[in-house]
Amino acid sequence: MGVINIKAYTADTMQIDAIKAFMKALKIKFEVSKETEKPYNEEFVKKIKQGDKEFAEGKGIKMSVSEFKALCK
């Protein structure tokens, strides 16, 4: 049995019911889940925002990819 994930951005419960009826009519096993998980860890987002703020305050440097690669050697 193959498994696929589908996200359906529905406008109302009637659309959800229609999708369920369609799946049942085709005898496809399915489960409905509500995505409550945020895509990014909140601590990670805080760190990125803090870095952006610090850079805007002049506490950072800009460098090209080639400059960065040279530093990493």
Image (cartoon, rainbow, N blue to C red):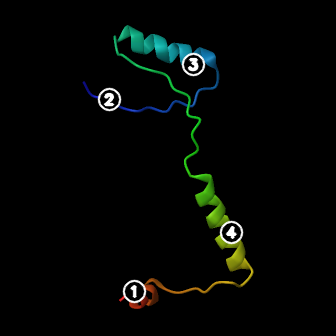
Q: What residue type is labelled 1?
A: Cys
Mark seen at residue 50: 4
For mark 2, give the secondary structure.
loop
- Classify residue 30 by image quadrant: top left
Mark 3 or 2: the one toward you: 2
Residue at the location (59% across, 35% down)?
A: 36
**Whole-percent x, y for residue 2 in the image:** 27, 28
Q: How crowded is mark 2: few (under 14 residues within 10 Å), some or many (20 or more)?
A: few
Q: Do labels 4 and 1 touch, CB within 8 Å? A: no
Where disc 3 sits, the SS reads: helix
Q: Measure the C-alpha gap from mark 3 to mark 1.
A: 53 Å
Q: Residues within 10 Å of mark 4 (few under 14, many from 20)?
A: few
**Residue 14: x percent and y percent?**
60, 14
**What's under tag 2, amino acid-wise?**
Val
Q: Which amino acid does label 4 sit on?
A: Gln
Q: Any mark on residue 72, and which?
A: 1
Pointers 3 and 1 in contact (C-beta within 8 Å): no
The numbered mark at residue 17 is none
Q: What residue is pinned by disc 2?
A: 3
Q: Looking at the image, which is closer to me, 15 or 45?
A: 45
Residue type marked 3: Gln
Disc 3 residue crowd, few under 14, some 14–19, many 20+, Cα 10 Å: few
Q: Which of marks 3 and 2 is nearer the N terminus?
A: 2
The answer to whether mark 3 and mark 2 are in CB contact below 8 A is no
Q: How many angstroms separate mark 2 from mark 4 (CA)?
A: 39 Å
Query: Disc 1 or 2, which lies upstream in sequence?
Result: 2
Residue occupying image coordinates x 58% and y 44%? 38
User: With respect to residue 38, does 27 lie above or below?
Assistant: above
Query: Distance from label 1 to label 2 (Cα)?
Result: 42 Å
